Image (cartoon, rainbow, N blue to C red):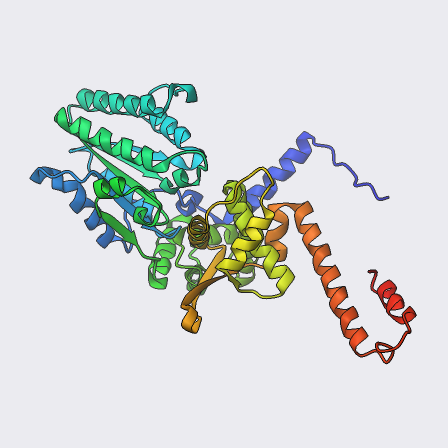
Amino acid sequence: MIYALQVELTKKAIDSIRKDIAKQNSIFSDKRYLDSLYLPSNIIGRRKQAEQLLKHIESLKQGFVVPQISVYGRSGSGKSTVVKFVCQNIGDMASVAFVNLRKSKTVFGCANLILSELGSRNLKSAEGLNKAVDNIGEMIEKILVSEKKKFFLLVLDEYDVIFSDPRGKPSDFVYKLLTLEENLREKGLWLCIVTISNNALSDYDLDDRVKSRMGNNEVFFSPYAESDVMQILQDRADKAFLKKVNKEILQYCANLSSSDHGDARRALDLLRVSGELSDGMKITKSDVDKAQEQLQKDRISTIVSSASYHLRVVIGAICGNTLLTGNSWNATSAIYTKYSKMMANDTKPLSYRRIVDLLIELENTGLVTARTLSRGRYGYGTEYKLKLSPEMVGPVIEKEWWENQIKIKENNDKMKELEKSLKSSPFRRGRGFSFPYALMKKYGL
């Protein structure tokens, strides 16, 4: 057995680590400009969406209040950045609260996150969702009175989280929030709820009473065009690096991110990590390739770790089917069958329709891609394919499960090879049973 030599952590070791980090960062002048959470002073390529959002908000001045605005589009399409930028510039007419719901896994947890952002204490689950929504209303009223305003904008980012709560009732929560808006209006106060999600709210399984109250006020963010991504990278690179970055390198980063649904956030991460992996003097294509590989691994871990139990099983179903069948593309029905078999005995599988919603959500993360095929008289069907190898994704889901899948694959391959050998054997019609047994021993079966 080989034992790794443990390196002692001393002040000298700390100084050495700091020098290595300083060398990594020597190429940057101000790295914060490559942070996807950094709010820039100017927005590139999203004027149309900003105008649509402001049109809904400014309708207050004409005496009409939009109760809910659904902002949706793929990850990295600028939704949160644009909404924050708009909210930052309407302080003269409205009070604003921006809440990221991703930190919660339940509907009640989302209500508590909103209360925390509004400055209220969190409630215990025993106090109920009704009390939580009532408290949200009281805090909004208190803020408006103290700021001497009439209009409140409640922005709920990552809103699709509420639809991943298997025990919660998303429709009831949305209905209660819309009822809250009506109650505040009776007091001469106006509330507009802006939801940010990967899919339009109308795509989710909501009650008709909720859909009718929501209206159809939507702002869609299409993926960035490659030219937009290039412009964003050029703008941020000029501020983030000490020396001008080669235009070919920026274009290479733009090409890679644009081939993955125009994700500007990923393009910025790619450029930042490329700089960290460089020699401190200039960024090369090799640095970008290394950064791409590193980010892919990090992205898988992030998606899987933040996914609900059912979504993790769906990802596992696609990985398992891809490995065992050898086919990259998986039909929705095949994924659902595999998903149902993989479920824990004490957990009820979700409906087929809900799994379709999860597959769409998974496509929006960029981990899978989809295509629609005509099946003749059987209509159209959708198939999904992993963008990364199942060998890279599988172990992240669960190492022991993936190792078991590999063993099943190996045994299946051995059986196929055995069957092939038996068919070509001259003894297959005779009584020479020792030959098949010898073959089975050879293949470890």
Q: Which quarter of the picture shows residue 225?
A: bottom left
Along the viewing direction, whichever of 352 and 20 lies nearer the viewer: 352
Where residue 423 appears, as percent x and y from the top left, is 78, 77
Where residue 239 appears, as percent x and y from the top left, is 38, 49
Can you see residue 277?
no
- Furthest toward the left, the residue is 62
Horizontal side, residue 86 vs residue 296: left or right? left
Along the viewing direction, whichever of 389 and 135 lies nearer the viewer: 135
Along the viewing direction, whichever of 158 and 278 lies nearer the viewer: 158
Residue at position x 44%, y 44% in the image: 31
In the depicted structure, whether residue 74 falls above or below residue 305: below
In the depicted structure, whether residue 234 falls above or below residue 95: below
Q: How many marks?
A: 0
In the depicted structure, whether residue 90 falls above or below residue 291: above
Q: Quadrant of the N terminus?
A: top right
Where residue 99 appears, as percent x and y from the top left, is 34, 34
Residue at position x 22%, y 20% in the image: 142
Where residue 157 appears, as percent x and y from the top left, is 35, 39
Residue at position x 64%, y 61% in the image: 324
In the depicted structure, whether residue 343 falls above or below residue 274: above
Horizontal side, residue 402 vs residue 98: left or right? right
Q: Quadrant of the C terminus?
A: bottom right
Can you see residue 254?
yes
Q: Which quarter of the picture shows residue 30?
A: top left
